[in-house]
Image (spheres, rainbow, N blue to C red):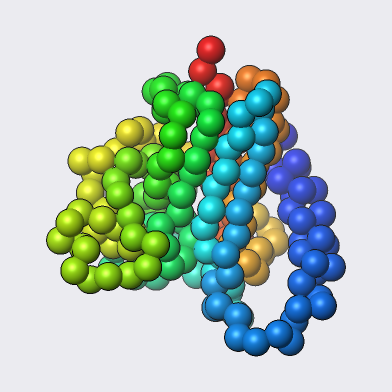
Amino acid sequence: MYRKTACRVLILSLCLAVIGFAPAAGQGDRPASPEGAASTQIGDAWIDITYSRPILRGRTGIFGSGEEYGQTLLAGGPVWRAGANVTTRINTEADLTIGGSTVPAGEYSLFIDLKDGAWTAIISKQGYMETFDRAKMAEGLTWGAYGYSADHDVVRAPMMTSTEEFSIDQMTILFSGVSDAGGAIIVMWDNQMGVLPFGVAQ
């Protein structure tokens, strides 16, 4: 269900993106990994994810395979930032349930521990930098996933993963199957997809 919904939403999103960006295509320099966001509303509560969206630019098999799976994306970091540049952030106005644990309303960092066929989502309370400052690494702040420490994890939850027959050029995070009871966060890039179900705590 999540896969079919994700594909339909993704096609619509890409069409809207082309329409929205066309007039501004030649206006100044653009970042290599543009800012992105995904949002949904459940009742009166909003859930927002902000991240940077890397582009394949002709690369194939960027996740790799076997023991080397994910190493290119980690780029020396302990886990994947689920994006590029600044740490990916999730802000929820509702208490959520993820992986059998409660995630109270608030703002968190989102990381993914990448293994071939086994992604683990990490919701973390660790502080982060909006702009890189090497001196702040000693203060325990993250830049992307650099400086990440498991000591700040709120929850680790397995994601459902799949290898698709198509390739997504620009990394995409979206919400799928959302209802009053919850939904799923979907992360897609190249031919890899990870799905993180979540519920709304009652």
Question: What x and y, as percent, mark residue 118?
Answer: 43, 45
Q: Quadrant of residue 66?
A: bottom left
Pick the quarter of the image with the N terminus.
top right
Nearest the viewer among 50 and 44 is 44
Nearest the viewer among 105 and 195 is 105
Nearest the viewer among 12 and 60 is 12
Question: What x and y, as percent, mark residue 33?
Answer: 54, 72
In-image side of 43 versus 150 (left or right): right
In-image side of 96 versus 55 (left or right): left
Seen in the picture, residue 185 relative to 50 is either above or below; the reply is above
Question: What x and y, as percent, mark residue 139?
Answer: 17, 56
Q: Residue at x 20, y 41 (%)?
A: 151
Q: Quadrant of residue 37?
A: bottom right
Q: Is residue 155 visible?
A: yes
In-image side of 136 versus 101 (left or right): left
Nearest the viewer among 43 and 17 is 43
Q: So how many labels did they put on this image?
A: 0
Question: What x and y, as percent, mark residue 159?
Answer: 48, 39
Q: Is residue 118 visible?
A: no
Q: Quadrant of residue 40?
A: top right
Q: Residue at x 42, y 26 (%)?
A: 104
Q: Residue at x 77, y 64 (%)?
A: 17
Taking the view exactly as shown, the residue that stands out farthest to the left is 138
In-image side of 116 versus 193 (left or right): left
Q: Residue at x 60, y 60 (%)?
A: 36
Taking the view exactly as shown, the residue that stands out farthest to the top is 202
